[in-house]
Amino acid sequence: RGPLHFLSGLSVTSNAFRTVNATIDRVEKVDTTHANLDFSRTRNVLFDGNTFNGITQPTANPITIAHVQTTAAATWAVDSGDYLPFATWARNVPGFVAEGAITTAAGDDRFDMPYVVVEQGAAKNVVNLRWPLAVKGLMHVTIRCDNPL
């Protein structure tokens, strides 16, 4: 009860969540009557391999987002949406990979590597891929809500 609580060492794996004659938004929730969790301290959270039936918003950590950038831009905003558990922040990007060519607006192939900026957006659930110049393409980005171990 009160502030400064955080998630550490939580594992929710291989469950079948199912509702009967109803639909619910999520399977997890934090009661914020007295305080919210401190998402800046989240560590070692695994939320994986679950099945969601009758649940509007499935949840996972880590998640992999296929981000398609159709117009050339130097910053790609990859939104984790509501997929991270407990509406936590996008704190870590352990990996990303391009599928197909990354190209300029003129269609020239580029072989540059972006860097990531985490905890972006009003809800801190967006990561930015920053490129040295405006490019477009498809990237698979893995996002975590925690710092593992």
Image: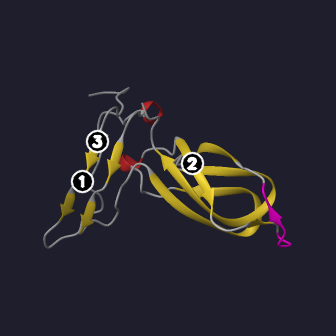
Query: What residue would you read off at disc 2?
Result: 95
Q: Spatial distance from mark 1 to mark 3, Cα to Cα? A: 10 Å
Q: Image quadrant for the N terminus?
A: top left
Magenta stretch containing residue 97, yes or no?
no
Separation (CA) of disc 2 from disc 3:
21 Å
The secondary structure type at the circle numbered 2 is strand
Q: Of residues 86 and 93, which is closer to you in this image? A: 93
- Badge 3 is on which residue? 11
**Position in image of residue 27 (x %, y %):** 26, 55
| Disc 1: CA contacts within 10 A as few (<14), some (14-19) or many (>=20) | few
> What secondary structure prevails in the magenta region?
loop
User: Crowding near pointer 2: few (<14 within 10 Å), some, many (20+)?
Assistant: few
The residue shown at (29%, 39%) is 33
- Asked whether, in this view, residue 131 is left or right of residue 17, the answer is right
* Horizontal and vertical percent position of residue 98: 64, 61
Front residue (pair 31, 142):
142
Q: Amino acid at mark 2?
A: Gly
N-terminal of the two: label 1 or label 2? 1
Residue matched to label 1 = 14
Residue at the outermost left position: 20
Q: Residues in magenta?
A: 105-111
Q: Which residue is drawn at the image coordinates 21% and 60% (left, top)?
A: 17
